[in-house]
Image: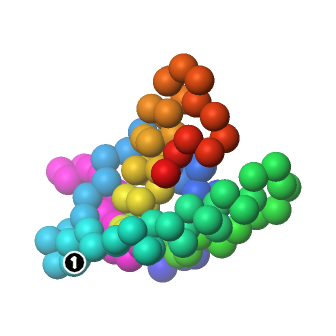
């Protein structure tokens, strides 16, 4: 296994098919966990600082089963995709102010 530092945006921007193996637990992050990561990221607003979101362990699929198998960190990856989706939808709304997202 080889580890590397990767920007979460760079990891997520590429079109990939993610697969959460059946042995992984269901998505279980609640409002408290989502609020914590939101506050961490919001604190970086207008900053050049970086933030360690957490590690993600994945395996590339085979020719017969292409995709990215999320071994660890699937809760964080799913949550980040949900944040991206919410931000994208909010950006499409007229008159979205700084404190509109909740």
The answer to whether one can see residue 38 in this image is: yes
Whole-percent x, y for residue 19 in the image: 26, 58
Whole-percent x, y for residue 20 in the image: 25, 64
* Residue farthest right in this picture: 48
Whole-percent x, y for residue 22 in the image: 14, 71
Is residue 90 shown left or right of residue 25? right
The colour scheme used here is rainbow
Q: Under tag 1, what secondary structure?
A: loop
Residue 4, picture quadrant: bottom right
Residue 27 vs residue 6, the one in the foreground: 27
The answer to whether residue 68 is magenta is yes
Provide the residue designation for mark 1.
25
Tell how many labels.
Answer: 1
Q: Which residues are magenta?
A: 63-73
Count neighbours of disc 1 (C-alpha within 10 A) and say few if under 14, some if 14 to 19, many if 20 or more. Answer: few
> For the point 39% across and 68% down, which residue is it?
31
Is residue 29 shown left or right of residue 98? left
């Amino acid at each position: 296994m080889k580890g590397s530092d990767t920007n979460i945006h760079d990891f997520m921007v590429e079109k990939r098919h993610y697969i959460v193996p059946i042995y992984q637990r269901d998505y279980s992050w609640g409002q408290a966990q989502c609020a914590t990561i939101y506050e961490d990221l919001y604190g970086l607003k207008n900053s050049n600082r970086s933030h360690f979101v957490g590690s993600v362990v994945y395996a590339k699929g085979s020719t017969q089963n292409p995709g990215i198998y999320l071994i660890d960190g699937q809760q964080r990856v799913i949550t980040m995709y949900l944040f991206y989706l919410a931000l994208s939808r909010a950006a499409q709304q007229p008159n979205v102010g700084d404190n509109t997202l909740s």
